[in-house]
Image (cartoon, coloured by chain):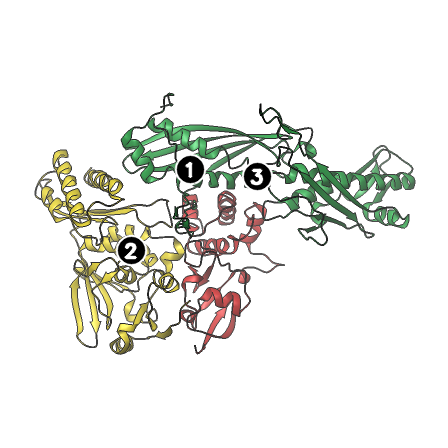
Chain colours: A yellow, B red, C green
């Protein structure tokens, strides 16, 4: 294992102080499930790591009137077991439950999943589908908020700067008739990276037409994002097989536009389309 | 690199050891404290052989920096039962033939313990899920699941 | 769309090395003055339970508790060369050596007991030796051992068992390849997602001819582990080499089944005793693994009408096959 210093902060202030001074040469560590293998393989070479797991203000799941706030060091297990999140964002709970195995879920955090920005992340695409907003703090700028879509610039590249700390995630509540699901395809049924995943959120209006639709395929592009063009095909209309087919086709085009044709494309493209169609049918029955 | 004093409660006993900041909990348990019951499998969180209970939760100790366990309660396999008074899970594993080479067993037992503490009467699927982070090559998991089921019913 | 299928795979497999390769097992059994028994074996128990089997065999012959036997194993200084721990040969080859050594010791003890008890119809049961017709004439194993020692009789026996075969004709392939074969049939029920190529194995039934299951729990354990390995072999395990370098270096990349991938496994042990095995027993170490992948692949063929010929039948391979509708000239079930 390479050499590095170990720092532990007990408050956000303490963390920000250190990051403002050494942020560019420091890696923040929470659950360590991504960072420790990366340190071991020397994929990153920081001078020091900053442990933020002892900061109380970064934990917790708080339901407010029109939104839910949860801390970045919330573990996947805590998400899985949260009645608040199960009630309001089952999509997020399904995504968190799909990660790794119990030991990984007991340590892995939602903040880590965001900041690590792996193209194969599970929780990150779910947060994109839910339109989460990130709360980021620094000594330099205080608090700034940014929508999660736009927070990831590329594989393993999150916009959060060296002197900044992710301090909260906020998701606005959806109307109760909203349905959602998360599908993950892995090579085996546990301890598997997503070959692909799909986050889907839909709500019909009184007449049965699609009022809101949010589609985020994951692990098929460098950065998970909503396929707005595909969503638009179905928006305002009643579900019909031809429309679904058209939307799936558009999704394929959008993905290829971003990734080009790669060795995995022959498999991933038809499969994500099939999973998309099948999932929409499942949600809207 | 300067060593830092690490204080933990391991298997109910206060422990103090000086460690380099780069050490993982797994290495400190095995190499500094001589608790070699916790196994080093893949050292990257893929196999679960290094499972310990940290503040009661099953974690891969290879993915915990030792200093992150500062002031915390750690339970290893050495803390589960005594040779003359085995834990019900240990008795059940023996009775049901759930141990072959034994390499996965310490981690498997601790995951099972954590599962039953949270969920005393799990379904078979819940048991499967509870040990899904512990790889076993010898048993096909069949007798392990039966052994855990047997303890949970009682 | 999900499609289900059922498949069956059968195999027979030679025990030991065969083909005139040397295959000799050995054992040293010692009865100490205090009646305790030490067994020395060159073989390794790495969890498959060979120590248990050898103890059971010796204990059965001497009428003592199998868990009272002290096993000394795999020590080149004190244990006899018995050949490798492999080739599904321990029970069948080395077990026979254990049997021979134990029987030789029993014969010696019998002589002493006959002299002391004045009867010849002696049974060795529950750590005692007694006459079947006159059960009041009995002596404890412990005392009998001491008596034998006091008479200066040999209380250590070494035995060998050789199953080296004559070999087959290099032209015709006919002859004496292996001393004995084990047989097994596995059945698999699978569900294939034709959209994704994912295969879920729903159920496995494994039927194995063990000759005689000296320890049924251990035999089941071997079969269950073998089935899980066969499942991984069929569906997810893949060694990737690039320019001679191993790319699948870790347990994260080389994917073996987790507890959520292995379905319920129903095991049936068929006992057709083989006269050349200890108590009729054969080995199951490798037979446990062999028919699983064929059963699963046949189940996939039954479900889809396509035959996988390249392993693993993973997501991409299966998906491509389904798209290409690859067929062999033979009809496949389904």
Position of the N terminus of chain A by quadrant: bottom left
Q: Is residue C79 above or below residue C281?
A: below
Residue C285 image label? 3
Q: Are marks 2 and 3 on the same chain?
A: no
Q: Provide the secondary structure element on which disc 3 rests.
A: loop
Mark 1 nearby-residue class (10 Å; few <14, some 14–19, many ≥20): many
Q: Which residue is mark 2?
A: A83
Residue C214 relative to residue B64: left or right: right
Residue B35: percent from the left, percent from the top? Answer: 54, 65
Residue B57: percent from the left, percent from the top? Answer: 42, 60
Q: Is residue C218 visible?
A: yes
Task: Determine the chain carrying the residue at label 1.
Answer: C
Residue C25: percent from the left, percent from the top? Answer: 69, 41
Residue C234 image label? 1
For this rendering, which residue is in front, C124 or C83? C83
Q: Residue at x 39, y 63 (%)?
A: A40
Mark 2 nearby-residue class (10 Å; few <14, some 14–19, many ≥20): some
Q: Provide the secondary structure element on which disc 2 rests.
A: helix
Q: Quadrant of residue B25?
A: bottom left
Mark 3 or mark 1, which has the lower sequence index?
Answer: 1
Q: Residue at x 33, y 50 (%)?
A: A193
Q: Is residue C250 above or below residue B10?
A: above
- How far is the residue under mark 3 from the one under mark 1? 18 Å
Q: Give the label, 2 or 3, closer to the camera.
A: 3
- How far is the residue under mark 2 from the one under mark 3? 48 Å
Residue A156 relative to residue B49: left or right: left
- How far is the residue under mark 2 from the one under mark 1? 40 Å
Task: Determine the chain carrying the residue at label 3.
Answer: C
Q: Provide the secondary structure element on which disc 1 rests.
A: helix
For this rendering, which residue is in front, C79 or A73? C79
Q: Give the label, 2 or 1, closer to the camera.
A: 1
For this rendering, which residue is in front, C198 or B91? C198
């Amino acid at each position: 294992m390479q050499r590095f210093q170990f720092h532990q902060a007990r408050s956000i202030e303490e963390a920000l102080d250190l990051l403002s001074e050494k942020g560019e040469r420091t890696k923040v560590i929470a659950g360590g499930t991504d960072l420790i293998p990366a340190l071991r393989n020397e994929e990153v070479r920081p001078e020091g790591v900053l442990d933020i797991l002892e900061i109380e203000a970064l934990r917790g799941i708080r339901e407010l009137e029109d939104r839910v706030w949860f801390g970045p060091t919330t573990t996947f297990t805590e998400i899985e077991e949260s009645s608040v999140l199960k009630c309001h964002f089952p999509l997020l709970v399904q995504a968190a439950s799909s990660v790794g195995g119990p030991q990984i879920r007991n340590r892995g955090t939602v903040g880590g999943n965001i900041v690590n920005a792996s193209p194969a992340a599970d929780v990150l695409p779910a947060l994109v589908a839910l339109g989460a907003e990130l709360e980021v703090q620094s000594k330099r700028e205080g608090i700034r908020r940014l929508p999660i879509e736009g927070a990831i610039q590329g594989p393993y590249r999150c916009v959060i700067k060296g002197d900044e700390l992710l301090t909260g995630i906020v998701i606005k509540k959806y109307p109760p008739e909203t349905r959602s699901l998360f599908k993950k395809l892995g090579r085996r049924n546990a301890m598997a990276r997503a070959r692909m995943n799909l986050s889907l959120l839909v709500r019909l209006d009184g007449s049965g037409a699609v009022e809101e639709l949010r589609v985020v395929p994951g692990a098929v592009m460098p950065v998970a994002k909503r396929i707005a063009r595909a969503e638009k095909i179905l928006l305002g209309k009643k579900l019909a097989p031809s429309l679904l087919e058209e939307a799936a086709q558009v999704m394929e085009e959008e993905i290829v536009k971003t990734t080009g044709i790669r060795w995995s494309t022959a498999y991933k493209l038809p499969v994500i389309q099939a999973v998309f169609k099948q999932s929409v049918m499942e949600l809207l029955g | 690199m300067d060593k830092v004093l690490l204080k933990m409660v391991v298997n109910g006993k206060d422990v103090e050891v000086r460690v380099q900041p780069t050490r993982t909990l797994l290495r400190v348990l095995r190499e500094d404290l001589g608790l070699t019951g916790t196994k080093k499998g893949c050292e990257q969180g893929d196999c679960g052989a290094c499972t310990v209970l940290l503040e009661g939760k099953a974690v891969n100790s290879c993915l915990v920096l030792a200093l992150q366990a500062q002031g915390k309660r750690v339970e290893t396999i050495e803390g589960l039962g005594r040779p003359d008074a085995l834990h019900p899970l240990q008795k059940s594993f023996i009775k049901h033939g759930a141990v072959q080479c034994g390499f996965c067993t310490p981690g498997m037992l601790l995951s099972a313990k954590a599962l039953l503490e949270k969920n005393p009467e799990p379904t078979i699927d819940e048991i499967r899920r509870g040990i899904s982070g512990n790889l076993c090559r010898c048993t096909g998991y069949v007798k392990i699941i039966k052994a855990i089921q047997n303890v949970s019913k009682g | 769309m999900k499609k289900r299928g059922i498949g069956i795979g059968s195999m027979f497999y030679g025990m030991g090395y065969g083909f005139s390769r040397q295959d000799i097992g050995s054992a040293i059994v010692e009865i100490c003055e205090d009646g305790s028994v030490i067994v020395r074996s060159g073989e390794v128990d790495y969890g498959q339970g060979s120590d248990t089997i050898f103890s059971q065999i010796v204990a059965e012959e001497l009428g003592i508790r199998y868990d009272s036997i002290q096993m000394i194993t795999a020590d080149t200084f004190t244990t006899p060369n018995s050949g490798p721990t492999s080739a599904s040969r321990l029970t069948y080859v080395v077990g026979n050596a254990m049997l021979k050594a134990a029987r030789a010791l029993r014969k010696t003890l019998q002589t002493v007991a006959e002299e002391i008890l004045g009867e010849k119809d002696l049974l060795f049961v529950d750590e005692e030796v007694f006459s079947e017709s006159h059960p009041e004439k009995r002596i404890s194993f412990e005392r009998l051992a001491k008596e034998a020692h006091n008479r200066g009789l040999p209380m250590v026996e070494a035995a060998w068992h050789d199953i080296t075969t004559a070999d087959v004709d290099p032209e015709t392939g006919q002859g004496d390849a292996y001393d004995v074969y084990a047989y097994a049939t596995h059945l698999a029920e699978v569900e294939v997602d034709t959209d994704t190529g994912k295969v879920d194995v729903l159920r496995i039934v494994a039927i194995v001819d063990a000759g005689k299951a000296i320890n049924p729990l251990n035999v089941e354990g071997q079969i269950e582990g073998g089935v899980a390995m066969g499942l991984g072999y069929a569906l997810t395990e893949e060694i990737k080499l690039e320019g001679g370098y191993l790319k699948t270096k870790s347990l994260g990349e080389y994917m073996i089944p987790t507890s959520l991938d292995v379905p319920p496994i129903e095991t049936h042990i068929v006992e057709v005793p083989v006269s050349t095995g200890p108590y009729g027993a054969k080995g199951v170490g490798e037979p446990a693994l062999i028919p699983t992948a064929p059963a699963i692949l046949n189940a996939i063929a039954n479900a889809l009408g396509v035959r996988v010929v390249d392993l693993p039948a993973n997501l991409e391979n299966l998906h491509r096959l389904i798209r290409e509708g690859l067929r062999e000239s033979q009809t496949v079930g389904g």
